[in-house]
Image (spheres, coloured by chain):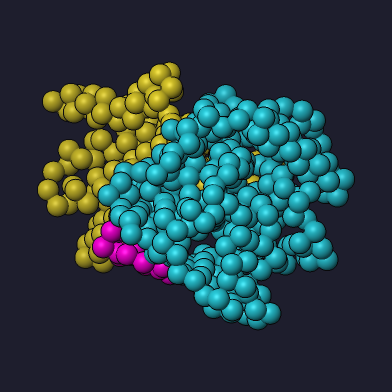
Chain colours: A yellow, B cyan
Amino acid sequence: MKKYLKLSVFVLSSIPFLLISYKIFFNKLGPEPIKEITHFTGEWTLIFICLTLSMSPLKRFTNSIVWVSCRRMLGLFVFFYATLHLLTYVGLDYRFDWSPILDDVVKKKYIFIGFAAWLLLLPLVITSSQKMVLMLKNNWKKLHRLIYVIAIFGSLHYIWLSKTIFFKPLIYFIIIFVLLALRIKIKNGKMNYG
Amino acid sequence: MKKIKYSEITPEKIYKNRRKFVKDLGLAAGSIFLSQNLITSANANIESEELKLTDYKYVTTYNNYYEFGTGKSDPVEKSQKFKTKPWDLVIDGEVEKPLKLSMEEIKTMFPSEERIYKLRCVEGWSMVIPWLGFPLNKILKKVSPTSKGKFVKFTSILDPEQMFGQRFPILDWPYKEGLRIDEAMHDLTILVTGLYGKKLPNQNGSPLRLMVPWKYGFKSSKAIVNIKLVEKMPVSSWMKASPNEYGFYSNVNPTVDHPRWSQASERVIGGGIISPRIPTTMFNGYGDEVANLYTGMDLKKYF
């Protein structure tokens, strides 16, 4: 049962990737294909961040631990789409022309914070295996709270790159804010938050 | 109403326009090279790349027109029912002879000509569009601006019933923009009534919009109802929204970044996944004609 659940989550989570691949191969990306890929992978990164952050609250509301079994995979999909997003920017958009890229990372806050968020994902990916969970014990939990920082960075990245906060950047900000606020409540109510 | 098909426009004219365009771009690129030392690689392919007209499909489906939503495809999807008839344009303020003209009067009084201009958006992309329009100075001369008319303020229509974006505080509605009088009188500054030999589509600012090719796209107001000559520099909607990001001048300038993103290069719309970014040129390639308007001005300060 659990196996099927994980398989279906994997298949569903792959759909955006298959969709953008189809659009690339069949030239259905519209007037600004590179921006389309960048925005598509960026938005799906944010969606997967929201999904990952939803699992603990869902566990609490439904009294079922089934959600938590999907969390790791969803988290890895955050990294997958974030990496595609980064590669699109570095490779497709700027053709690995490092000087303007480095200039942007240093000078432009939305690039800086986006890149920082991607870097922060690395320790989470490296320590995502069951072996690592056992090895790091309590530190694992602490380390993986980095996802809260990553979520905030991701949301700010979107707000700062947009000409106006209306509407999508604001919507993602609110969703992430609510998902994080739910945790503060849990923490105050229950000492054994996990 | 007489419609000119794009295919009927004389090839000589296009040819001439294009040659002029090549010249402008070449000179502009050269001057940047000398003064800023920014462009170090040869840009031999820029002209052919930039001169290619952007597909009609893209010109009319990829738009920034926040009155109809902030997504690029919102304008084409949500503006089709927008009513552009009847439409009046009022030209008043510091003028001797204020005027109120209907669109029909405007079209008969000021015959449109074709102008192929490059449009550079502040977001970092560009298109090349064959506009139909006439110089703004023709209409301004009719009203005789007084010596107090130092700036021109453009106000677009306010109609939240038809424009759902205006029901949200995205910008200070109605959309307001402005030009200095010499910029407004410049021959390159046109009022647009059509594109690609056709009537101006709603999503492109029908029935009447501005086009100032050496400035970022947002300076070229859409669906204009009022042109007012004023003494003091008007505050545009974008200046009000974010004064440190959008200046009054907003000339295309690769050396002055938007505070949040670079303006050094741009993507050509419709170029496809393999087309590279191109370097952005000073005054969008029109420096030859307009640089003299800004002699002695610090364009970093007056961005």
Task: Look at 37% across and 39% down and name the residue there.
Answer: A44
Query: Which quadrant would residue B163 be assigned to in this image?
Result: bottom left
Out of B179 and B123, give the one closest to the viewer.
B179
Answer left or right for B112 relative to B286: left
Answer left or right for A99 relative to B6: right
**Looking at the image, residue B102 lies above or below residue A118:** below
Out of B137 and A142, give the one closest to the viewer.
B137
Out of B28 and B288, give the one closest to the viewer.
B288
**Looking at the image, residue A164 lies above or below residue B154:** above
Location of residue A124 in the rendering, given as x and y in whole percent from the top left corner:
44, 40
Q: Is residue A161 magenta?
A: no
Task: Look at 58% across and 71% down and name the residue there.
Answer: B143
Residue that sits furthest to the top in the current view: A25
Location of residue A111 in the rendering, given as x and y in whole percent from the top left corner:
57, 48
Q: Which residues are magenta?
A: B158-175
Please say whether residue B289 is visible from this viewpoint.
yes
**Which corner quadrant holds the N terminus of chain A?**
top left
Location of residue A156 in the rendering, given as x and y in whole percent from the top left corner:
46, 55
